[in-house]
Amino acid sequence: MSSSSNSRADIIVDLKGLLDAGDRSPELQQGVEVERQTLAVSVTEVETLKARQEELTGLRQEVTQQLKAATGRAKEAGMRYRSIVKAKIGPHNERLAQFKIAPVRPRPRKQKIVEKVVLVVKSPDGETSATEPDASVSPSIKPVV
């Protein structure tokens, strides 16, 4: 067997060739019959398992498709069930949380946030005065822009 071919198909082809070579050599058959039978059983087992693996691959793909479809149907049924439960016990009932449904709750009123801006002006004589921007200020205290 060549050491460079490691694929399963190459190994099977190589082993079948080995069996054929043994069949063409009648002088060796009696001395290696036990080993030949073991090899033939092993090759047959590998071929059977490979065929089963290919069959199961197809079945796995089919089952995956069925599983996706069933999951979609289950999600749809869950949405319907939650809708019916919400309609039966009311949209404000806190028991909805048991069904992983958020009940309608009163929202807190938003309070207006008023920020006061204080303008600090230093007069030429060193005095500091604080005023709000909208307050009426004498022209001498207003900042120069």
Image (spheres, rainbow, N blue to C red):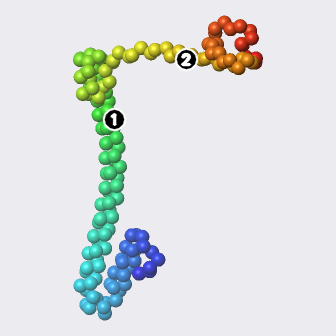
* Label 2 crowd bin: few (<14), some (14–19), many (20+), radius 10 Å: few
x 25%, y 79%: residue: 38
Q: Quadrant of residue 45?
A: bottom left
x 25%, y 90%: residue: 30
Q: Nearer the viewer, mark 2 or mark 1?
A: 2
* Amino acid type assigned to the residue bearing label 2 in the image: Glu
The relative height of residue 114 versus residue 72 in the rendered view (above or below) is above
Q: Nearer the viewer, residue 58 or 17?
A: 58
Give the secondary structure at mark 1.
helix
Looking at the image, residue 102 sits to the left or right of residue 139; the answer is left
Q: Can you give x and y, in whole percent of width and height, for residue 143 in the image? A: 72, 16
Q: Nearer the viewer, residue 23 or 82?
A: 82
Looking at the image, residue 103 sits to the left or right of residue 132; the answer is left
Q: Residue furthest bottom?
A: 27
Q: Can you give x and y, in whole percent of width and height, for residue 23 in the image? A: 32, 84
Q: Which residue is tagged 1?
A: 72
Does residue 142 appear in the picture of this structure?
yes
Give the secondary structure at mark 2.
loop
Q: Which residue is tagged 2?
A: 115
